[in-house]
Amino acid sequence: MSAIGVIGLLLAIACLIILSYKGVNAFIASLIASLVVVVTNLLPFWETFSGAYATGLKNFVGNYFLLFGLAAAYGEFLKVTGAAESVAKVLFKIFGVKWAPLGALLITLLMAMGGVSAFVIVFAVYPVAAPLFRKANITKNLLPGIVLCASVTLCLCLPGNPTSTNALLARPEYGLGVDAFSAPVMGIIACIVGTVLAGIYVTWQARRQTALGVGYVVSGTDALDDDEEKNLPPFWASIIPLLIVVFVMILLKNVMSATNSILTSLCIAIVACVVLNPKVFFGAHKKHGVLKTFTTGMWSSCTSALLLTGGVMGFAGVVQAAPGFQYFVDFANGLTTAFNPYVSASVAVNVVAGITGTALGGLQIFADTMLPNYINLGINPEAFHRLMTIACCGLDTLPHCSTFILMCSVCGVTAKDSYKHVFPLTVVMPILLTVLCILMISVGII
């Protein structure tokens, strides 16, 4: 296997990270990074871009364009009706200035456990969290880390969490014989510890950044201005659309697929926004048109967040098509008998997730290529399932992670400014929780 191909993959990832930090458009950066992989791995030039890259981009856009579009439209309706601002004002009174980041963390975790995916949840959480941060003059650079930590790291710890990642190893074909509620004690302890650590970090950083003079900076993604805040809808009418998203999904989870239940709940929530705020959209004094509001939200997601994220997924497709990628898979496979199986599996899944930039993708490759080796080593299936579900979201959130790119786009912050908070919350945190889980397994806390 060519060493140049392996080095090329690492250079390509470094290239994507550096370009993103320099403020280069993530879609363009993904093309340049893919070019590095193509050249160093001697892949057919145009065939790779029209094949592996286009397929990764196409599959992602095809699978998520409705989710992104409706979620963004829903966020736009929360914004123009003042519902997000109304809910934020009540939450601001509950949590106060110094606890606003912790409030955003808990709100995100509750919505994630309700079944809203990380790709969608940011569109709903941001319009509510941004006014909290704005009034407290807390930098928005904390928000991508908060949303990622709560909707991925903390959510995956909890037994029964409604994510594809949690369901993956529970599939019958993998032979673990577990369900989504495996290792409940270990998972709950890990979530509590993670929530406490995350809460301490975001609260400390909010105060620290403000003391350093780094406060809230208004961007084009922000909500209502001060004049519109004077005529906000009542809290009860504002909270209903948010509750609809969670409860409709729970009601429909056994009736239709997870994706379809999300889409249905978003549509009902949008209709609720219109029905509960008729003066905003109808009559002589209307402020916004229903179709225009829907179009603004839907189009903004398709032209920015969806394409930026899709480009990074296209790059991941090129990486997996490169011969050099097999080296990392072989390296991870070689760890099977080198260490304690729980330790080696945690390292292996992180290596693959780190290269591909996706937790679910990393866990999928691990399950398909390495899991049988571990089943034969006499592992505890429930403990192994929960451990792998937590461990896979460690190195996946390096700066080339597509979900991170999405969070930055929606929150109106740069990768460079926000990643210093994302790294401790979504890379260091899962690794620490993985170590904690291995220790609990070793003493029989499962």
Image: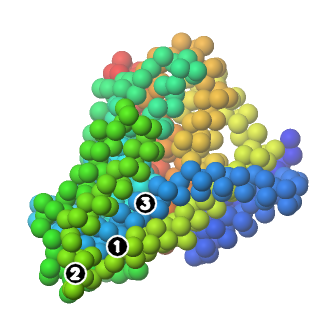
231 relative position to 252: left or right: left
Is the residue marked by circle 2 packed among few (<14), some (14-19), or many (20+) residues within 10 Å? few
Q: Position of residue 366 (x, y in %)?
A: 62, 32
Q: Position of residue 289 (x, y in %)?
A: 34, 78
Residue sitting at 40 percent across and 66 percent down?
73
Q: Earlier in the sequence, mark 3 or mark 1?
A: 3
Q: 207 or 262, which lies in front?
A: 262
Q: CA distance from mark 1 to mark 2?
A: 12 Å
Q: Which residue is mark 1?
A: 290
Q: Which residue is mark 3?
A: 70
Visible residue check, residue 20: yes
Please name the amino acid that badge 2 sits on: Gly
The mark closer to the camera, 1 or 2, is: 2
Image height of 23 relative to 157, above or below: below
The mark closer to the camera, 3 or 1, is: 1
Q: 60 or 439, which lies in front?
A: 60
Residue sitting at 29 percent across and 45 percent down?
248
Q: Which residue is mark 2?
A: 283
Mark 3 near mark 1, Cβ–Cβ under 8 Å?
Answer: no
Image height of 159 relative to 392, above or below: above
Q: Earlier in the sequence, mark 1 or mark 2?
A: 2
Q: Position of residue 414 (x, y in %)?
A: 49, 72
Q: Position of residue 17 (x, y in %)?
A: 61, 64
Visible residue check, residue 432: no
Give the image quarter of residue 234: bottom left
Is the residue marked by circle 3 packed among few (<14), some (14-19), or many (20+) residues within 10 Å? many
Give the image quarter of residue 204: bottom left
Please name the amino acid that badge 1 sits on: Val
Image height of 105 relative to 210, above or below: above
- The secondary element bearing badge 3 is classed as helix
